[in-house]
Each structure stands twice: as structure tokens, then as C-alpha cells.
Amino acid sequence: MQILNYNLEAFIPYDEDNIEKFLTICEDAIDNITNDEKPKFKLKSAIHELLVNSLEHGYKKNPGKVSLSIKRTEDSILFELCDEGNGVDIEALNLNRRVSDLNSMSSRGWGLTLVNTFSTNLKIVPNSPKGTKITLTIPLD
């Protein structure tokens, strides 16, 4: 069996156990969407990074609602994560920065940059009525 479309909506308290439970559910779905280790790693990395960002920045470490959608197409996997948090200043993001030395990696904010490097189409837009919607495409190699 192969899952072709997966949707999940959850209200997640900001604590390690609940974050891990949500991630485990998502990882199980990803395991059923593709057997290819490369896109599987990218999807699992993306969900971890985007979920933590949503809860830490969008909800300021408070509980919050998160919606996840993963859809497999013939040649890629489409991924979308939405929250109803505070939103993000899209213009302040620097998704194309590069590592110049090890000291540059010590600053925060590298997660979205990494997600951008392995996605062919990362979009970050406001969610309606509030929050952030992040979509990305992971190619199936």
C-alpha cells in the first residue's frame, strides 16, 4: 500500500512529548508515501524544522493549531504546513544565505535555509485569517 494524500490537523501543546507524538505520526505517514530514503529524509527534516518554528515563533511557545498536508504526485511530493500563529515577516528572511565559515553556522535561523536548499519550490505566505502557510515540493529522484 502507498498513501497518496495525507492531511492532519492537530492542536499541539509546546512540550517535548506532544511535539514528538506529532512528529512520529507525520513520520509514519511519510514512510507510507515513499520508500525512497532521500525524499523521506528531506520530508522528515522539513516537518521537524517547520513544526518547531511554528510553535516557537508563531505561537511563542504556547499551544497552537497546525495543519499538515502531504500529497504524492508522479514525480514529487507536495508538502504544506499551516498555522494560525503570529505570522512571519517574509521580507526579513534570508533563505539564500551561504555558510562562509563555521562561525556563521552558530547563529540561529538556518533551518528554513536548509529546507529551501532541498526543496524545488519553497513558498512562505500569510495564512488566512492569520498565521503562516509554508509549501514546498520535494522531487522524487
Image (cartoon, rainbow, N blue to C red):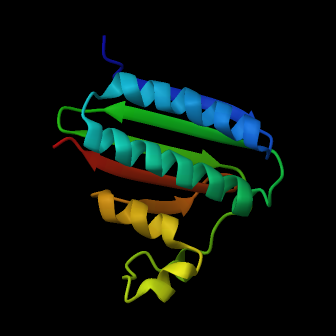
Q: Nearer the viewer, residue 17 or 83?
A: 17
Q: Is residue 25 above or below residue 45?
A: above
Q: Position of residue 6 (x, y in %)?
A: 46, 26
Q: Quadrant of residue 114?
A: bottom left
Left or right side of 141 for 61: right
Residue visible at 80% across and 61% down in the picture = 60
Q: Is residue 134 above or below residue 30?
A: below
Left or right side of 138 for 63: right
Q: Nearer the viewer, residue 111 or 5?
A: 111
Left or right side of 73 for 129: right
Residue farthest along the top direction in this orientation: 1
Report the number of numbered marks. 0
Residue farthest along the front direction in this orientation: 102
Q: Position of residue 102 (x, y in %)?
A: 44, 84
Q: Nearer the viewer, residue 9 or 119?
A: 119
Viewer can see residue 121? yes
Q: Position of residue 76 (x, y in %)?
A: 24, 40
Residue visible at 38% across and 52% down in the picture = 136
The quadrant in which the N terminus is found is top left
Q: Position of residue 88 (x, y in %)?
A: 63, 68
Residue visible at 43% across and 70% down in the picture = 113
Viewer can see residue 77? no
Q: Is residue 108 above or below residue 48?
A: below
Residue farthest along the right direction in this orientation: 62
Residue visible at 45% across and 42% down in the picture = 44
Q: Nearer the viewer, residue 29 or 41?
A: 41
The quadrant in which the C terminus is found is top left
